[in-house]
Image: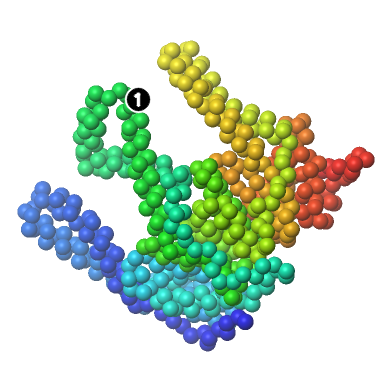
Amino acid sequence: MSTVAPPADWRRLDPRTVLVTALVVAGVVAGAAVPLTLGLTRWFSLPVAVLQVLAGAVLVIAVAAGADRVRWHRTRYRIGQEHVDLHTGLLLVKRRSLARDRVRTVDLTANPMLRLLGLVTVRIGTGEQGSESTLELDPVTRAEGERLRRLLLDRAATTPAGGVHHEGELAVLDPRWIRYAPVSFVAPMLGGAAAGAVMQVSDWVGAQGQVIEWVGDRFRDTPLLWTVIALVLAALVAGVLGALGLWIEMWWNYRLEREPGGTLRVRRGLFTSRSISVEEARLRGVDLVEPLGVRLLGAARLDAITTGLAKDHEARNADHNTLLPVAPRTRADTVAADVLREADTPTGATLTPHPRAARGRRLRWSLAAVLGPVLILTLLGALLTPVLLWIALGCAVAAVPVAVALALDAYRALGHALSGRYLVTRSGTLRRSTAALERAGVIGWTVKQSVFQRRAGLLSVTATTAAGGGAYTAYDTDASEGLTFAAAAVPGLLEPFLERAGELGNPRP
């Protein structure tokens, strides 16, 4: 049963928003007060500088709190029978309205300050492109946020007949999963960012030369190669520590559950709590993602393929479609089956391998990507200095085996299949993706065949859908097999564009 909406009365945000703004601005001002005070001591005595900074801080905090007080006074919202309305603004008044039947997400977020006060930020979205498709109520009480979420998402749900109808908790955090954080691509990125931050901050305070000199003194008697190795290892250690901290902040208290109203809900976060809801009626499948590092350890992440998730800038940076963090592959397959209400997960289906010609294409691409720069270095070395020739040789020796290994791995990843209600495609090496897309969610097919693919008897077929990434491709399939796969996946959709050739009835476009 869906929840009956209460009378459409206008409500205000929580008045403690003024306190939150004042405290946040006070924290920012406190961080800037020390360097500002030291700077003022060049022209004034220390007591005078402190008084000036204090006066400025009080003024800034008062102005920010006053502006937020006006925002609170001029903001109101209501949940009507057909629309969600938000009115705000002083000089420029905004009146925005979302149709209730188009609301797809109601996400609750609370940073440490809001959690301390029992408040949350509520984001109500239709999943369409642009900021105008989202209403933000910042902040309301946690009880009010939960009321809004239930009111807007608790609709009569339809579930697939004959499936596995498990409700309640589907997955909960296993602290042992933290072991996958250091092998993600985030660790080296954070390590490089840490090194860059040290140099940038030292430059701001005019101490970059001293930092470089200090590092030089530590490695004065160390060969250059070992110096570089030591600095890279130090950056990697910093990156690993950062990756561990980021994982704890993002996924602590993680829980995935199915609510009686037909909604999948993900709750997570240590300091900043997040609650993300996905309507099962909008779920079109799942995507099992295996980045190279975690795949070597037998792990994977599970994402939702769904229509109606928020697509604005903030949502794209919040992992809104992730149902399960990196976990053992067997656990990810189990959760995928539970999410899709299937006895056997489509992500574990046996896939049809692709022809050996696809392997040759990947080998040629990888070798071209590596040998191209090597050739340029060789030409420059012949014209300018023999040093570049040695660099070219080193790059070739180091990069060619890696390129070949990645190309072979990319070929082994290729595959496609039909598994019950789902079509399954797999591809990728640095980021292997196994997408199980509901066949009823396919709205069209795109068939691509380049000149080189035609000569090799290959083509790529792409299922287009309104959910997830919008397109899921089986790359470099056998021409006949790929068309048969597409035609069988959604009967009647592709046949008008095919003609049968030969006694075996092999289809061709």
Q: Residue at x 56, y 62 (%)?
A: 309
Question: Residue 439's x, y, as percent?
Answer: 73, 58
In which quarter of the view is residue 260 placed? bottom right
Q: Is residue 437 above or below residue 95?
A: above
Q: Tell me if residue 441 can be seen.
A: yes
Question: Residue 292's x, y, as percent?
Answer: 53, 42
Q: Which residue is mark 1?
A: 225
Q: Residue at x 80, y 51 (%)?
A: 487
Question: Residue 23's x, y, as percent?
Answer: 27, 67
Q: Residue at x 65, y 37 (%)?
A: 411
Q: In this image, 36 relative to 282: left or right?
A: left
Q: Is residue 202 above or below residue 332?
A: above
In which quarter of the view is residue 196 placed? top left
Q: Is residue 326 above or below residue 449?
A: below
Q: Is residue 116 above or below residue 225?
A: below
Query: Which element carries disc 1, helix, strand or loop?
Result: helix
Where the C terminus falls, by quadrant?
top right
Q: Tell me if residue 75 can be seen.
A: no
The front one of 80 and 238 is 238
Where the N terminus falls, by quadrant?
bottom right
Q: In this image, 122 relative to 36: left or right?
A: right
Question: Residue 12's x, y, as percent?
Answer: 41, 79
Q: In this image, 418 relative to 222: left or right?
A: right
Q: Residue at x 79, y 43 (%)?
A: 481
The amino acid sitting under disc 1 is Leu
